[in-house]
Image (cartoon, rainbow, N blue to C red):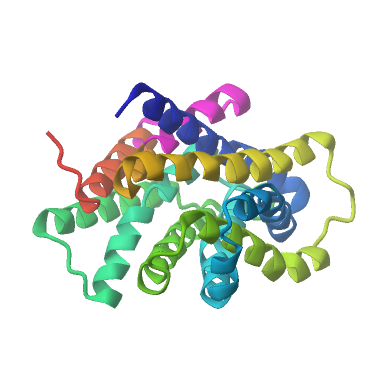
Amino acid sequence: MKGRDLLDLLLLAAIWGASFLFMRVAAPHFGAFPLVLVRVGGAALVLLPLLFWQGQAAHLRQHWRVISLVGLLNSALPFALFIVAALAINAGLSAIFNATTPMWTALIAWLWLRDKPAPLRLFGLGLGFAGVLALALGKASLQPGEHGVSPALAIAACVGAAALYGVAANVTKRHLAGVPALTLAVGSQLSAAVLVAGPAWWAWPAVNPPASAWAAALLLAVLCSGVAYVLYFRLIARLGPAAASSVTFLIPLFAVAWGAVFLGERPTGAMLAGGAVILVGTALAMGVRLR
């Protein structure tokens, strides 16, 4: 990996790690679906000119039905679930559960596409899910917090969102192979915006969110979706999808750091240990060979 690629990888991880911080700031003021609409709608506006500049609009018209399904599974629903989780648990913990996405992808590929993983990857799945269970049991209080969401519900939302990402990855693999990544990104953000427009309008907050919440929401849209996707496409083009996916392991580190610096969220020893087990299991499930 060249220096420029490593810089892009670290920048992408820092941006996606910050997305959990921005959700923590904006979620109490917007609610789930309104914040999703701002995020995916803003991202679509940022990425659409790039789609036409690359001449990929025809791909979007050809595959819009399946891409709309991916928009539901990969953006609209999981974004809403992570926003719900942000009302009760800290940014670092949400990012750790988000890092289980490759494990869910491998498990669903095994159950649905009959793509059985090798023994070492199976061990990684088991180890990773054991880490999830241990971490969840240590945090899964049923007592609702300040915003009416319990830690148990928040953890379930994170795990459900990661599982939806896994389903979306397999739908993409099966039905959208060969479709350019930029087309998938633009189409999924645009379709997600259409899908959540009704619920977002119905649930729009009666009191206009403060400037800090709007700033966080716009950063989610422009930086964490628009700019981040451009970085991600560039890494895929230069390094391939497998190397680009290594960003998964760095996101929780940045999310924990941003939460500690800006929100005073101090990670516990149990959280760090559980996160380490999950990341090792995820690495093995992805086929990464550990020395």
Name the residue located 46 percent from the left edge and 52 percent from the top edge.
140
Q: Is residue 252 above or below residue 98?
A: above
x%, y% of residue 245?
36, 45
Q: Is residue 62 above or below residue 259?
A: below
Residue range in magenta is 250-270
Viewer-proximal residue, 166 or 225?
A: 225
x%, y% of residue 85?
57, 52
x%, y% of residue 228?
54, 41
Q: For residue 253: magenta? A: yes
Name the residue located 88 percent from the left edge and 47 percent from the top edge.
208
Viewer-proximal residue, 192 or 251?
A: 192
Q: How many marks?
A: 0
Viewer-proximal residue, 243 or 180?
A: 180
Q: Is residue 264 above or below residue 190?
A: above
Is residue 86 at all visible to an observer of this figure? yes
Viewer-proximal residue, 225 or 135?
A: 225
In the rendered image, the quadrant that contains the N terminus is top left
Name the residue located 73 percent from the left edge and 52 percent from the top edge.
38
